[in-house]
Amino acid sequence: MIRVIENIIKKSKNKFEYIDLGGGMGIDYGLNSKKLNYKKYSSSIESLLKKYKVKFIFEPGRSIIGDTACLITKVIYVKSSTKKNFIILDSAMNDFMRPALYGSSHRIIPTVKNNKILKKIHDFVGPICETTDRFLTLKKYQQLKENDTLAICDVGAYGIVLASNYNLRPKPAEVLINNSSLKIISKRENINKII
Ligand SMILES: Cc1ncc(COP(=O)(O)O)c(C=O)c1O
């Protein structure tokens, strides 16, 4: 990217005062996702800074807040077949839309671990009858039962801001955790509010 920008600077007759490098630094989603090498990124920018008198602008989004939040969800039902287990959650694509919208993968971790690992396909899905109401598919997972709670990780960016009342579903509460103190920063919506 830096090479492309440098070519533009060289070829253009304009003198640039600002260059906006935007966002897109991403975060480590923990599922073999690639992480930006910040050292390389900053040294390539430094090299441009030395050559040209330009002010750089950054618009980081996810890299600041992506891994600061998780969506706590409850298992409503485990629908078991010979081939796979559907883990039906009480969260759905309206609560967290990234997987349905553009196929992003977010780790789902149990809030209480056990050692009973089931080597079977696990499809973590929401309760809305939509093909895209699916969060993640894993080849194995610990044994789950109704009312177990799970955390869908790294939902701090493009999470609650993309949530909707699709299918007449009230949005979840947002809780801010600071060390050991909890504060409800937006209450769980009530169905009466949206009908
Ligand atoms: C104009 C602009 N800048 C920056 C960003 C942030 O991108 P990211 O969260 O991938 O860092 C966005 C995201 O939508 C954007 O639209």
Image: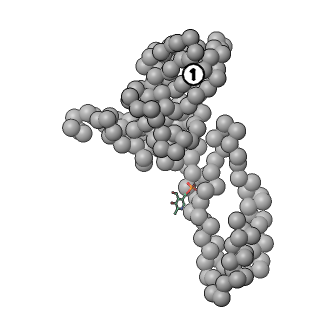
Residue at horizontal 52 percent and vertical 48 percent from the top:
157
Image location (x, y in percent) of residue 75:
46, 21
Image location (x, y in percent) of residue 7:
72, 76
Residue at horizontal 77 percent and vertical 58 percent from the top:
39
Residue occupied by mark 1: 122
Residue at horizontal 49 percent and vertical 35 percent from the top:
71
Q: Is residue 24 visible?
A: yes
Q: Amino acid at mark 1?
A: His
Q: Secondary structure at mark 1?
A: strand
Q: Quadrant of the C terminus?
A: top left
Total labels: the figure holds 1
Q: Quadrant of the N terminus?
A: bottom right
Task: Left or right? Give the position of 21 relative to 164.
Answer: right
Q: Is residue 184 above or below residue 56?
A: above
Q: Quadrant of ligand 1?
A: bottom right
Image location (x, y in percent) of residue 172:
38, 35
Q: Is residue 60 above or below residue 94?
A: below
Coloring applied to the structure: one colour
Q: Is residue 183 visible?
A: no
